[in-house]
Image: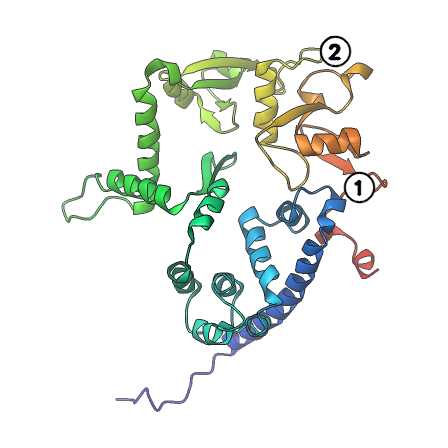
Amino acid sequence: MRNLATAPPVVRPAAMRLGRLHAAMAGVLVELLCELAEFDSEELWRTDGATDMVSWLTYEFGLLPRNARGWLEVARRLDELPEVRRRLASGELSLDQVRALVKIATPDNEFDLAEMASDMTAAELERLARKATEIPNHQLVADEPHRHLEWWWERNERFLHLEGRLPAAEGTVVEKALLRIAAEERFDASGIPFRPMQERAADALAVMAEEALQRHGEALRPTMVIHVSAEHLAGGGGSAVTEDGPVLAIETARRLACDANWQLVIDDAQGAPLGVGRRTRRIPAWLTRLIKARDEGCRFPGCGRTRWTHAHHIAHWANGGPTDLDNLITLCGFHHRKLHNEGWEVRGDPNGRIDWIHPHGWTHQPARRLPQQALAG
């Protein structure tokens, strides 16, 4: 039998090539992160109308907010952690590994931590960071405002997405409740659950919400607004759309309507609801729901805020602009003031593409789409 301990190493040309490419990418990434840290410290994102560095990155580089926050967490620490920076630049450590390391690394312990991290996965480092982090009482108070829960509909997939975070105490309660309800699902003959834990946990969350509504009786039964074409409504075929955007089969809409208050909005052949004409600036509740469902938050690039939003007339109502879906967009208060107070303009079709015009006259575009000669200059 061949002795594997003394066998020559296996040559993996494809893996080696990928390793070289990863190292090259890592070097550029570190350069980018260092530039980002300087850009952030000088708050240059303000000149592009962003509310903070995360929203700037979300639009300029097309990142998810959680990934943008991860970039910033690393960028803000690299200057004081030269060994971690060196290993990230060489590709020895990945961005995910370093994101965990910067939570616990100091100039005094970074060399030992970086050496140890080379043989650990990012998940293992995350667990290590959680265990090693000491949380003083004042930090618990400071953490409270950072709890959040966000949700949004994926229209194409017809799923509700959830993302958020809770302080440890509340998070433990939610976790225990989900696990307990998920564990109650029946087992098959071999004792193995029919479905993975992730699926059962999703059902458990829905059960928790349903039970909460049932405890409060009729008063909290949800109101569901269903949009359906006159043709589909009469013929029974086709599909319907709820006010939040997901597409429903006609039969699904009927089933949901059995347990909810519901309101029909009949659309024309092109799928457009009626506006309320030019004679009023006041936006009725049903039209406000339509605007929010279409826009899913503030329409300024990279913002997306869903709370404390306003409906803005692109063509001002006083100048004859109609108060209807084709002339209204959703803006947060910050970006609404940008338009009215700071000289920004918005143009285009609210139901399609809209362009934001900077006070200096150029069309606002993300850095990743700017011509390379402009970047070089």
Q: Position of residue 329 (x, y in %)?
A: 67, 27
Q: Position of residue 83 (x, y in %)?
A: 56, 74
Under circle 2, the secondary element is loop
Question: What residue sits right under mark 1 in the picture?
Answer: 363
Q: Position of residue 85 (x, y in %)?
A: 58, 70
The quadrant of the rendering that contains the C terminus is bottom right
For residue 352, say whether it is visible: no
Judge from the rendering whether residue 66 lies leftward or rightward of residue 52; answer left or right.
left
> Depth check: 260 or 353 in front?
260
Q: Quadrant of residue 352?
A: top right
> Depth check: 75 or 5 in front?
75
In the image, residue 179 sits, relative to residue 344, either above or below, namely: below
In the image, residue 276 sits, relative to residue 8, either above or below, namely: above
Judge from the rendering whether residue 336 lies leftward or rightward of residue 205; answer left or right.
right
In the image, residue 149 sits, relative to residue 107, either above or below, namely: above
- Give the residue displayed 76% in from the left and 16% down from the top: 317
Question: What residue sits right under mark 2 in the picture?
Answer: 278
As measured in the structure, the alpha-carbon distance from the residue carrying label 2 to the one carrying label 1 is 29 Å
**Mark 2 belongs to which amino acid?**
Arg
Label number found at residue 214: none
Disc 2 crowd rating (10 Å Cα; few below 14, some 14-19, many 20+) is some
